[in-house]
Image (tube, grey):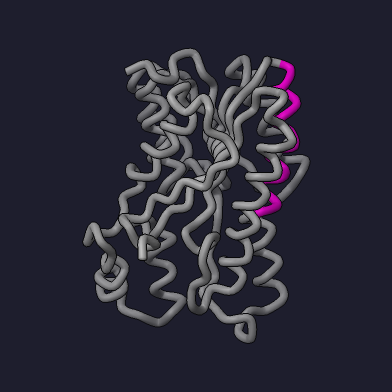
Amino acid sequence: MDTLAGKRALITGAASGIGRATALLFAREGAAISIVDLDEAGGQAVAQLIGDEGVPAVVVPCDVTQGAECEQAVQRTMGELGGLDILFNSAGIVRRATVLETTETEWDRVMTVNVKSLFLMSKYAIPIMAEAGGGVIINVASGWGLVGGPKAAAYCASKGAVVLLTKAMAIDHGGQNIRVNCICPGDIDTPLLRDEARQLGEPVDRFLVQAAERPLKRIGAPEDVAQAALYLASDVSSFVTGAALVVDGGGLAG
């Protein structure tokens, strides 16, 4: 497949979960991939799979909450892949707690990883895209960025911020031919989802059964979100910007 042939994509959180699935899919569709993650070993494993397909991949260890490291990740991507066409901001964390149960440190950490990292990566990627004539930025938000959820105050706040940051960036940079959209997943079968069960003190198996209680009667797979990201990254969505695409098996339908 060659939907993204000749494109260069930087993907944060690409060592696991949604980021990993998207990196592999984008590579199969012809894109060279910059795997940006704190987990260097996991990133190398993804790079090996991509390399087996004959597609260029670079692993960039990076703390996406640090501006200097984000700038270096973008510059290294440019240096090794020769450009940057797609930024997929997938790195994120979750804290399941009410406002009363959330410490100030936890609040700051969730907001920094889930929101500040998008700001930083975009800040350094946008000038490169603008100079090249355009690009695509895709942010991972959440269904709980559109509606509230129980015992997830900091997480909901952060993902709501992602949705509106996405829209603001789409307005600001549309004239530079940079499209900015976000994906709002429901429960997706990733290590993060299992961590939620542990935080809530619930058996993982029971938690996963409850998470499947939606019209399509299943939990989402990382590949489901990756396919949505492929749509937003490709020219098929050339007139789509500022959108929040819900990928949740109908969980928010009614």
At which x and y percent is residue 173?
A: 71, 31
Q: Name, please, the residue furthest toward the front.
A: 254
> In the depicted view, which residue is nearer to us: 198 or 207?
207
The answer to if 121 sits in the magenta stretch is: yes
Which quadrant of the figure contains the N terminus?
top left
> In the depicted view, which residue is nearer to us: 68 or 160?
160
The answer to if 231 sits in the magenta stretch is: no
Which residue is pictured at 37% across the width and 16% down the height?
A: 2
Image-based side of 195 in relation to 241, left or right: left
Q: Is residue 196 above or below residue 86?
A: below
Image-based side of 196 in relation to 131, left or right: left
Can the viewer see residue 90?
no
Can the viewer see residue 128?
yes
Which residue is pictured at 54% across the width and 21% down the height?
A: 8
Provide the residue span drawn in magenta: 115-131
Q: Is residue 181 above or below residue 112?
A: above
At which x and y percent is residue 150?
A: 48, 78
Q: Is residue 113 above or below residue 196?
A: above
Q: Name, please, the residue furthest toward the bottom.
A: 100
Which residue is pictured at 39% across the width and 73% down the height?
A: 197
Image-based side of 66 in relation to 43, left or right: right
Q: Is residue 203 above or below residue 70?
A: below
At which x and y percent is residue 45?
A: 40, 37
